[in-house]
Amino acid sequence: MKTDKIYRTLCIISMMVIIWIISLSTCQAQTNLTTAVDFTVTDVHGETHNLFSILNEGKHVIVDFFFTTCPPCIQSVPILNQSFLDYGCNTGEVFYISMDDGDTDAEVLQYENDYGGLLPSVSGIDGGGNSVNSAYGIGAYPTVVLIAPDHSIVEQDIYPVTDITSALPNAGLNMASCDTGSTTSIKEVDLYSKKCLKMFDLLGREVIEVPVGKMYIRNRKLNIRK
């Protein structure tokens, strides 16, 4: 009897291990596609993006699939931000875009503000992200996909997301400086008033308010807000 119980217990444990291994394997390569499906979406700042148009410019595309209450997605934000900065802020060989599932523009904007996301972000409900998640068969988050200019999917899921630091060089991609012509870098020197001037980053997003009378650095030049 004891032998039978031990045998049944071992069988149950074995089945659980097998199920666990299968679940881990399905967490990899979250899209089964090997060729990209085209999409046209509008990000939360009103910019429209067509995948094939970007690819036809000779760029690779990173698509970050996420949703706003996903803890691992939140943890991946600084990693993707750094990669975005390292590879030219969408002015180099790589174009980055975040594709939400199930949230509104307002919710994705709040996510950007809360966690400092730099990538152009498309909401699932208002921007068209839901249909893209569906077309790519995404079922776990975050999923980060790398697409080549010939429309082939080079990386079905860069996991863990920290592997992006090796995935891009492995694809022959080179780092690039961000085009800072329209980027504003601010450093506070002094403060005299509460009246403010709004400042915007490279993507047109409000990033800081500069009070009247405050000295600040803009494009490496010292200025005073008058």
Image (cartoon, helix red, strand yellow):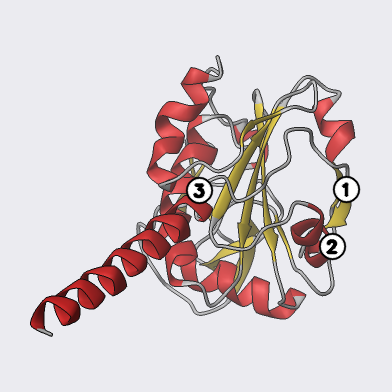
Q: Which mark is residue 28?
A: 3
Identify the residue shown where x is 67% and y is 58%. Answer: 138
Three-letter amino acid code at the position of disc 2: Ser
In this rendered view, identify the residue nearer to me: 63 or 5.
5
Q: How many marks?
A: 3
How far is mark 2 from mark 1, CA to CA? Answer: 9 Å
Q: Give x and y (percent) for residue 126.
A: 84, 72
In this rendered view, identify the residue nearer to me: 76 or 185.
76
Q: Which residue is mark 2?
A: 131
Q: Which mark is residue 211?
A: none
Asked whether the residues under the numbered discs 2 and 1 touch, taking CB atoms below 8 Å apart as contact, a structural biologist would say yes
Quadrant (top left, top right, bottom left, bottom right) of the C terminus: bottom right
Identify the residue shown where x is 38% and y is 43%. Answer: 162
How far is mark 2 from mark 3, CA to CA? Answer: 21 Å
Identify the residue shown where x is 9% and y is 82%. Answer: 2
Q: Give x and y (percent) for residue 40.
A: 90, 50
25 up-or-down from 127: above or below: above
Identify the residue shown where x is 46% and y is 56%. Answer: 22
How far is mark 1 from mark 3, CA to CA? Answer: 23 Å
Earlier-in-chain disc, 2 versus 3: 3
Comparing marks 2 and 3, which lies closer to the viewer? 3
Q: Quadrant of residue 61?
A: top right
